[in-house]
Image (cartoon, rainbow, N blue to C red):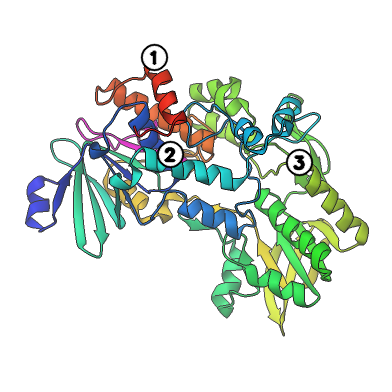
């Protein structure tokens, strides 16, 4: 608990602002968009503290290096629009109008039985976010630098310490919103041991780090690559490898390693089963659609502790989308004999000359596999204790962890135990995973979280509620690109 006198005695310049959002990525953008548009909060009352220059910076980097550049389609629903509170017009309608084609609308009409789920191109999504950021005055709210800590203030509210080239600055606020994303890339023990021992960042790479050199080398000479994982990034990496072979005539051999190998429908009971084939578990989106606004969402809001963790375990797991063009390319690769799958885990990796030797433990025993590269697509690190700001919050501000190890939040996304007088700390995005709402790390999830935060701020009397009339007026402003 810090006092104003302590900050003043430390010689740290002090700025007053009612609402501070820490992170500056997609979570911060969506939340301040709701506060500005629906809550009527002026830009002068909000500051976004971030080391990013624009809110889609990290997201675009991660999608690009994981083989989902701007012209590719991402795993997001047509109505999940981070730039549009209403979700209307959807991305499918926007694309249909732009291309003067009814094909996107027919795809939405017939999905998922007679067509793949419609998903938007990344370029359309990012252009929409940039447009909305200008409309709400995002860069007027942005202060760049590294946030070091958030501490409770005696008398209520918080101090957030930002460090940049000008030194340290304290922002004294009523509320703080944390949307800091993941702590970093996740490296499994075998991968970490290999890199630590040999300082080799060339042969073993994470799917979420820049690894273009792998594709460049494989185009020039024959080689074997081991791809580990079964999620959406794995699918994108496989698509890139297969496309490069078909397009450039390379002689790449692909081996895919699944920790859990699915070859049929699976699930805890007959009403909760997802399809699986050739190792993959298939699901249109990260979670069943009812997680965002149906029975599953309502059920999760009633559950506590271990009961909620059990449902997360039931609906969780690594999945990818069933897309027809992916399936066609995988079928070509299988038929050609240059794509193989295996279920198991890597026990050890070593370098032998210019090749990797991966020791794989599987149901039939142990085998050594010689490969030129390993691309690990097992995800990002969500451990909140590894993030500087969140770790400090847990140690000094009364915050606790939920049964899944992330920040324990209320249904309003207030961080439990971290209240300070009239002030509240909110956390949305990956840090709040395991709470009362499952799909937090998705576009629609970030929007639902932001709406809960805004509603709580409104309940406390610090912003407006948006009724039907004002909602219609604000939508017309959005449609015409008029500033908030």
Mark carried by residue 469: 1
| Residue drawn at point x = 43 percent, y = 19 percent | 472
Mark carried by residue 132: 2
Residue, far bottom: 353
- Specify the quadrant that holds the N terminus: top left
Could you tell me which secondary element the residue under label 2 belongs to?
helix
Residue 435 shows up from this direction: no
The residue indicated by pointer 3 is 322
| Residue drawn at point x = 71 percent, y = 75 percent | 217
Point out the tag, 3 or 1, that comes first from the N-terminus: 3
Residue 102 shows up from this direction: yes
Does the magenta stretch mainly form a helix, a strand or a loop? loop
Mark carried by residue 392: none
Query: What is the x, y in percent for residue 23?
Result: 37, 49
| Residue drawn at point x = 61 percent, y = 25 percent | 290
Point out the tag, 2 or 1, that comes first from the N-terminus: 2
Residues in magenta, as a range: 407-429
> What whole-number distance in Å separates the C-alpha atoms at marks 3 and 2?
31 Å
């Amino acid at each position: 608990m810090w006092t104003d006198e302590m900050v003043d005695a430390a010689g740290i310049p002090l700025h007053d602002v009612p609402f501070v959002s820490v992170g500056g990525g997609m979570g911060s953008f969506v939340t301040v968009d709701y506060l500005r548009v629906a809550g009527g909060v002026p830009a002068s009352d909000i500051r976004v503290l971030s080391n990013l220059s624009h809110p889609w910076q990290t997201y675009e980097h991660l999608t690009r290096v994981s083989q989902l550049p701007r012209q590719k389609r991402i795993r997001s629903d047509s109505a999940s629009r981070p730039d549009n509170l209403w979700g209307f017009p959807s991305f499918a309608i926007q694309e249909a109008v732009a291309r003067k084609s009814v094909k996107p609308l027919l795809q939405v009409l017939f999905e998922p039985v007679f067509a793949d789920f419609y998903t938007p191109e990344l370029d359309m999504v990012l252009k929409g976010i940039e447009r909305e950021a200008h409309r709400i005055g995002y860069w007027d709210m942005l202060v760049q630098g590294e946030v070091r800590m958030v501490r409770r203030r005696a008398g209520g509210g918080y101090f957030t310490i930002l460090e940049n080239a000008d030194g340290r600055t304290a922002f004294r606020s009523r509320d703080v919103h944390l949307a800091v994303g993941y702590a970093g890339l996740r490296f499994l023990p075998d991968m970490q041991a290999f890199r630590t021992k040999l300082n080799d960042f060339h042969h073993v790479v994470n799917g979420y780090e820049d690894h273009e050199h792998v594709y460049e080398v494989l185009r020039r000479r024959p080689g074997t690559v081991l791809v580990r994982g079964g999620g959406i990034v794995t699918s994108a990496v496989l698509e890139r490898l297969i496309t490069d072979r078909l397009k450039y005539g390379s002689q790449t051999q692909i081996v895919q390693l699944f920790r859990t190998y699915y070859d049929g429908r699976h699930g805890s009971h007959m009403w909760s089963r997802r399809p699986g084939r050739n190792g993959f578990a298939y699901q249109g989106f990260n979670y069943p659609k009812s997680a965002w606004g149906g029975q599953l969402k309502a059920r999760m809001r009633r559950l506590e502790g271990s009961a909620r963790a059990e449902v997360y375990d039931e609906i969780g797991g690594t999945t990818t989308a069933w897309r027809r063009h992916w399936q066609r390319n995988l079928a070509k690769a299988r038929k050609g004999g240059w794509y193989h799958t295996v279920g198991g885990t890597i026990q050890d990796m070593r370098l032998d000359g210019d090749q990797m030797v991966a020791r794989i433990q599987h149901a039939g025993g142990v085998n050594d596999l010689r490969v030129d590269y390993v691309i690990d697509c097992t995800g990002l690190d969500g451990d909140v204790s590894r993030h500087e700001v969140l770790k400090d919050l847990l140690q000094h501000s009364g915050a606790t962890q939920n049964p899944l190890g992330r920040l324990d939040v209320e249904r309003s996304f207030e961080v439990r135990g971290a209240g300070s007088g009239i002030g509240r700390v909110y956390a949305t995005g990956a840090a709040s995973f395991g709470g009362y709402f499952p799909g937090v790390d998705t576009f629609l999830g970030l929007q639902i979280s932001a709406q809960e935060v805004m509603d709580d701020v409104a309940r406390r009397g610090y912003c407006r509620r948006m009724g039907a009339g004002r909602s219609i007026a604000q939508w017309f402003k959005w449609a015409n690109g008029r500033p908030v």
